[in-house]
Amino acid sequence: MSNLTDTAGRVGGSYKARIAGKKMLIYVVCALLCAMSLLPFLVMFVNSTRPSADIAQRLSLIPGNMLSANIKTLHERQNFDVLLGMRNSLLVSASATCLCLYVSLMTAYGLTVYRFKGNRLAFTFIMVILMIPSQVSIIGFFNEMYKLNLINTFWPLIIPAAASPSVVFFMRQYMQGGLPLEIVEAARIDGCGEFRTFNMIALPMMTPAIATQAIFTFVGSWNNLFTPSMVISSQKKFTMPMLVSLLKSDRFRTDFGTVYLALSLTVLPLFVVYFALSKFIIGGVALGGVKE
Amino acid sequence: MSQANTLKRRSSRGRLEKTYWGYIFIAPFFIVYAIFQLYPLLDTFYLASQKYMITGANKVIGPTYNGLKNFQQIFKAVGSAGIPKVAQVFVNTAVMWIINFIPQMLVALLLAKWFTDTRFRIRGQGAIKVMVYMPNIITAASISMLFYSLFSYPQGPANSVLASLGIIDKATYLNAGVAATVAIPFLEKGWAVRLIVSFINFWMWYGNTMIVLIAGILGINPSLFEAAQVDGASSNQVFRRVTLPLLRPILLYTLVTSLIGGMQMYDIPAMMQQQGSPAKDMTQTVTMYIQELVYSGTKDYGRSASVSVCLFLVTAVFSIILFYIMRDRDAAAQRKAARAARKGAVKA
């Protein structure tokens, strides 16, 4: 660094000023971008406390005093059951995440620890299917679920999570660096069964990778709208994103306050989780995050 | 010596017992994949060649083989813009992806350059990352519904801002009865909806891209930057001649994954559709069209499947490109690991 300032020595003062000026600009741009991230949510939260007529008339960032009235309308008149949606989503996402992680870890472990015939082929296969989005086979999937009588159940949203190539890929990468095979062999020599070695020795060593992937899998499942909207039609089984799509129906047409309130309720849990785990999540993205 | 021993043991482990356990460990993945993804995929291809529909009156027709008729039909059905509807939905998807991706990449690159430039030493990077990444984690459906409400017509936040800025007549706007005469029906204008959808995509994803790029830049050997600086390169030259070429694999990876994800775009444009809005022709995406074919009036599985096959083929082309990029990355990482292991063995 000092080299650079030396070469620029003749214009030292103006160079420093230029850097300071540019720095100023960067901070202003960053502040604006942060505001851009927050503003829509701020408007949403504030509007959920304001009367509908007021929302229609002007934009304001000063909270109103209609929060409890809006809650009452949402609950009684509109019969919009956020808790039920949350329960459904939680059930689906938690089960899908556990299943996805355990099976993916098993697969990655099998590929990393054992040298069997077809090992490389299996991995190449997983790399290939990694690129096929599940949306392209939705008609066949819908047809199959229909035949199996699984329409309007949560199974089609949970079981397929067991085959998540991207999670397997990530786990395998992590295992190659983070799981010394010597330990597996030592356990084996000590008479530890294969499954027990996996459960008691390999899994605990994978905790950081599991935590990262758990968050992304959970959020991905929680936010999914396409698959549920194909296989679920009974309103009792609606997941959160499906519930949100109800807000577009005519009965909410002028009830702005309740719409913003309902939206706030769907967003709030994610806000809490995100800000509690943000460091972790950002770290996970930097690791070469898995894009949906 | 111990390293060399390990290497020897590792390479001979293939001949040790218990290798069949490998099959047991990977079996659940492949079984679930075969039942819940591979079969549906093959079935989609099969259905694309069948006449198979359920009429409004719940009458099932087919499935009977009709060759490529479904494809002929979807290419014959002309949309309002005068080109086949199936082409129109692909164009819509591509347009909304491009308008989002170009600024997304540019902003992410610029921010990544600023954050990694040692002349600036920007403080609070952690907090900024947390803020700009945040929209990515929030349910896309909720975010779209939020923007849908912000642009509501005749009265709503976007129009009220226009009114207070004097762009539309304020007095008329504030009168609920006649507000519709001056307010702008954003959600009925094709280009407006396209821009809103693209903006939401941009807004949700540039933070993610930025973090990936910063990680990529920090992964570059610092001595390369130092060497360039010693040779008198300006910081812009370093960025253009050293950073960008070394980032190429990551840039390509981001491009292709975003493209594949973009082709499946559903949540945001679907939530932005207003019932009966003329904007639909310009904003319906491929996946929305696939869903419409099996969820409206006559449920036409055959045609819907044939649109899926088209989407599959387009995605496959991009996927093959991505596969080669990632394979090279993986192979390079393995070569590096092998080299490090050899080095260690020699030293010992």
Image (cartoon, coloured by chain):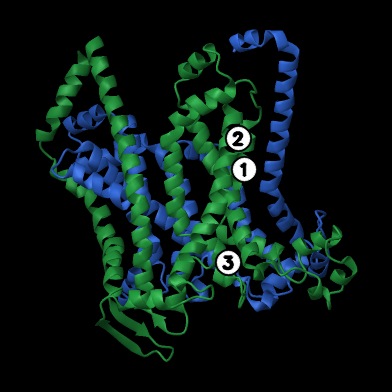
Output the chain of dot 1: B
Residue B290 at x, y percent in the picture: 43, 71
Above/below status of A33 relative to B179: above
Residue B132: which disc?
A: 1
Residue drawn at 44 percent across, 21 percent down: B221
Above/below status of B85 relative to A123: below
Residue B111: which disc?
A: 2
Q: CA distance from mark 2 to mark 1?
A: 11 Å
Output the chain of dot 2: B
Comparing A217 with B283, the one in front is: B283
Above/below status of A68 relative to B69: above
Residue furthest right in the image: B171
Q: Amino acid at mark 3?
A: Met
Residue drawn at 46 percent across, 49 percent down: B258
Residue A186 at x, y percent in the picture: 21, 28
Q: Determine whether the residue tagged by mark 1 lies in a helix, strand or loop.
A: helix
